[in-house]
């Protein structure tokens, strides 16, 4: 009896020894250690997403006077074909989805006879005191809804400076007495020429999308 018990005890202890040895070896083989130096560090940008100092500022818009100096009315007439679905250009032409555009330059805004203008355009016109100046035309044709919020004008706008200038140069020709282009070197309104500088001279009228708002 004692001999059999000793055999079983020895077998049990041997089994325990083997299991413990296997566990110790497994821990040593598969244990992972953090590297002394991480491969790379990701740092969140400071400032909550704000632009960093020294970031490039957006380019300023080119003045319409500068653009018109090299504009071409013949090219502008081709651009105007996109507008013809909504506007007529001839003298005495009918209103369509948009008003007739004959003599549009310097015409009081929202005053063309027989056309029903949107409330936004009427408000912008200040009762007809505001006119379709070259500057107004340039900004409006760049982004109608951005320049006059609430306008019914469906045109998305023409972001190409040269193309837009060509179109405005063509609109300039739609008149018995085309309005002269602004001088390309003229100082902004309200500013005086530098002391000793020669006054800006008016550039001669050049021969000369879609057009002003509904």
Image (cartoon, helix red, strand yellow):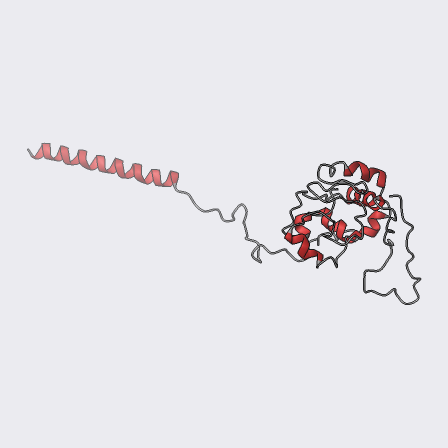
Query: In the image, 142: left or right of 76?
Result: left
Please name whichever residue, 58 or 65, is drawn nearer the observer in this view of the structure.
65
Given residues 97 and 75, the one toward you in this image is: 97
Position of residue 82 measured from the top left corner of the image (x, y, whole percent): 73, 37
Q: Position of residue 206 (x, y in %)?
A: 89, 46
Q: Is residue 191 visible?
A: yes
Residue 187: x and y in percent read 84, 60
- Is 177 placed left or right of 131 in the picture? right
Which residue sits at x=76%, y=36%?
Answer: 81
Which residue is the extreme one toward the left?
1
How many labels sit on residues? 0
> Left or right of 42: which side holds 102?
right
**Residue 63 showing in the rendered view:** no
Closer to the camera, 29 or 70? Answer: 70
Choose between 33 and 190: the one closer to the eye. 190
Determine the image quadrant of residue 188: bottom right
- The residue positioned farthest toward the front in the image shown: 114
Question: Splitting the image into 4 quarters, where does residue 47 fall?
Answer: bottom right
**Residue 176: percent from the left, percent from the top?**
87, 46
Residue 199 to residue 110: above or below? below
* Left or right for 38, reference 65: left
* Quadrant in the picture for the N terminus: top left
């Amino acid at each position: 009896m004692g001999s059999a018990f000793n055999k079983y005890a020895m077998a049990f202890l041997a089994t325990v020894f083997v299991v413990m040895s296997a566990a110790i070896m497994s821990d040593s083989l598969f244990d992972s250690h953090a590297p002394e130096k991480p491969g790379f560090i990701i740092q969140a940008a400071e400032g909550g997403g704000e632009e960093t100092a020294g970031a490039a500022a957006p380019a300023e818009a080119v003045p319409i006077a500068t653009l018109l100096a090299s504009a071409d009315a013949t090219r502008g007439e081709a651009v105007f074909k996109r507008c013809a679905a909504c506007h007529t250009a001839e003298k005495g032409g009918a209103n369509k989805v948009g008003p007739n555009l004959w003599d549009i330059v310097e015409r009081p805004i929202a005053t063309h006879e027989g056309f029903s203008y949107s409330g936004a355009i009427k408000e912008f016109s200040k009762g007809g005191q505001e006119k379709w100046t070259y500057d107004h035309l340039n900004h409006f044709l760049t982004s109608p809804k951005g320049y006059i919020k609430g306008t019914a004008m469906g045109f998305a706008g023409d972001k190409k400076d040269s193309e837009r200038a060509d179109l405005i140069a063509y609109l300039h020709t739609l008149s018995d007495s085309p309005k002269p282009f602004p001088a390309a070197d003229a100082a902004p309104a309200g500013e005086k020429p530098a002391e000793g500088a020669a006054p800006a001279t008016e550039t001669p009228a050049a021969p000369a999308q879609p057009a002003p708002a509904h």
